[in-house]
Amino acid sequence: MPDSTTIDRMKSRLQSLAPQRLHIDDDSALHAGHEGAKSGGGHYRMTLVSAQFHGLNRVARHRLVYDALADLMRRDVHALTMTLLAPDELAGAAAASGNSS
């Protein structure tokens, strides 16, 4: 079953992207009984802000994350929902979501 050590390992590997903000939630309990849960792979939701995303499209940003998490994606992570932003996009994203923080 996924636990905080998987999140810690994800955060460690993502340091290669020099995150200015990184938050990962374990949503595995919401997917109990799902096929991926049977094999032990967890469901995660992540927000990552990195200057390395500047000028990259969504697919290129996802590739950077998948490359950093490659071994975990094969066995520990079944699903990963990602919000990937460059620092200059952060204010716009907060305004669009109605969040002023």
Image (tube, rainbow, N blue to C red):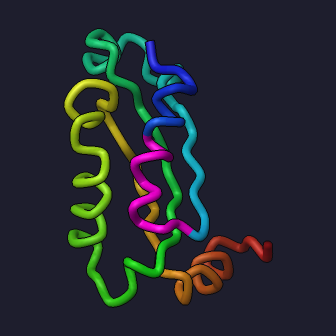
As rendered, which of 90 and 72 lies closer to the eye?
72
Q: Position of residue 81 (x, y in %)?
A: 40, 49
Residue at 59% in and 52% down: 23
As rendered, which of 52 and 30 lies closer to the eye?
52
Majority SS type along the magenta span: helix
Range of residues picked out in magenta: 10-19
Instruction: Tell me if residue 58 is in the magenta stretch.
Output: no
| For residue 33, side relative to residue 18 (left or right) | left
Q: Position of residue 35 (x, y in %)?
A: 26, 16
Residue at 22% in and 69% down: 59
Residue at 53% in and 32% down: 26
The image quarter in which residue 71 lies: top left
As rendered, which of 18 and 87 lies closer to the eye?
18
- Residue 17 sits above or below residue 12 on the image: below
Residue at 25% in and 25% down: 75
As rendered, which of 65 and 45 lies closer to the eye?
65
